[in-house]
Image (tube, rainbow, N blue to C red):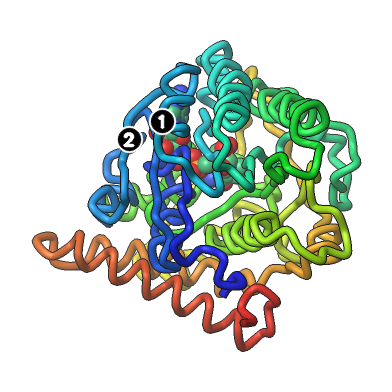
Amino acid sequence: MFANAYQGCRVFITGHTGFKGSWLAAWLTQLGAEVCGFSDTVPTLPSHYAALELGSQLVRDLRGNICDRSALRNAVCDFQPDIVFHLAAQALVRKSYQQPAQTFETNVMGTLNMLEAIRACTSVKAVVLITSDKCYRNNEWPWGYRETDHLGGQDPYSASKGCAEIVAHSYFDSFFADGEAPRCATVRAGNVIGGGDWAQDRIVPDCARAWAAKTAAKIRNPWATRPWQLVLEPLSGYLWLGARLLLGQNEPFDLRGQAYNFGPSSDVNKSVAEVVETLAIHWPGFTSEMNTTKPANMNECTLLKLCCDKALAHLGWKATLTFDETVRYTAEWYRYFYNGDARERPQNMMTFTLGQISAYTNTATQRNQIWTQK
Ligand SMILES: NC(=O)c1ccc[n+]([C@@H]2O[C@H](COP(=O)([O-])OP(=O)(O)OC[C@H]3O[C@@H](n4cnc5c(N)ncnc54)[C@H](O)[C@@H]3O)[C@@H](O)[C@H]2O)c1
């Protein structure tokens, strides 16, 4: 798996208490990595991080603010990682309207501080910086955005991710271009779903909260179309890219300083309404109310697709699951969480989560995904 690059590898992850970061940290521990996590808080209650008692599985479980440049540099230099995955961010579009300055500070200056910490730490060989599909200037095109398309973003969150991309590629070109420097890349994924997300104003967490309270979920923007994918799909791309950057040998394409989209195949772009309808199939008793009124002063795009041909050409990466499988994994995680025995939950949820990772990698192996080969 992943060319065995993570066995005994020292990995520094920011945002490990968040939804994607906690899945990534759990997967890396399963792969035999020594993981240090750096995050300011646990962002939700409940959380995937707490449900797994993930902190006890890590070599270090640090609390700090990525806007504090010296604290972040000290944490990285002290741990001496081989590779860094940077996921910490203010990740919510709605919150970015309420706290635009804090969103830009965290997402732009936080990325810059991460790059400064990497400059200061000689052990780092590879870096994967996570931005977003929303970094592109959205033209409501019906086709997928390519890595060479204009960056942009109307709402503060999307714009902050476009800015983070510009900062990162400036550092790649200015400081990380020569042969001995850390090999770095940015990654842009679409909307991820999966068990353990309890963020505000996201469709699956909204449904999970409503289902747990035995009420109908209120669905905003049912017409919005997104490249939905299971959280493990982009993570397989990040891990495979990270492994290739770490190993850095005999690459037909130079991966350094590149940006990669990781999304589902283009026929898996579905509307919010289709996600909700498919969840209802795998989530007995689930009901919803579709709200078709757009909130005032909110300008979130309605159509966003990614073209992932570059990840296929350079890395041999493509998505594994169908849309129905993606929603089924998600529904099963929440059903297990809400129906399981609360006293045994942390142990159970870690076992269950690692079981989902194993099931996903088995499916990927059967479907000949390149990163599963020895
Ligand atoms: N979830 C999605 O659908 C999605 C889609 C595209 C891109 N992304 C990106 O992926 C990354 C992870 O997203 P997520 O959904 O796991 O987000 P999340 O909100 O669940 O987690 C965010 C993490 O960042 C940490 N964090 C936030 N501000 C911080 C600060 N100032 N200092 C230190 N840590 C801080 C939080 O503690 C948490 O660990 C983000 O960069 C996000 O923009 C997510």
Q: Which quadrant holds residue 358?
A: bottom left
Quadrant containing the C terminus in the rendered view: bottom right
Q: Is residue 193 left or right of residue 60?
A: right
Looking at this view, name the residue that lies furthest to the left: 343
Is residue 4 placed above or below 132 in the rendered structure? below
Residue sticking out furthest to the top: 101
Quarter of the rendering containing residue 61: top left
- What secondary structure is marked by label 2? strand
Residue nearer the viewer, 14 or 351: 14
- Please state the total of marks drawn on the protein image: 2
Q: Nearer the viewer, residue 237 or 123?
A: 123
Q: Say whether disc 2 or disc 1 marks the residue closer to the N-terminus.
A: 2
**Residue 133 in the image: x percent, y percent?**
71, 43
Residue placed under numbered mark 2 in the picture: 62
**Residue 280 in the image, given as x and y percentages of width and height:** 46, 66
Q: Secondary structure at mark 1?
A: helix
Q: Position of residue 322 (x, y in %)?
A: 64, 74
Q: As shown in the figure, which amino acid type bears the numbered disc 1? A: Ala
**Which residue sits at x=83%, y=55%?**
307
Q: Is residue 104 left or right of residue 24?
A: right
Closest to the observer: 347 or 133?
347
**Residue 358 visible within the image:** yes
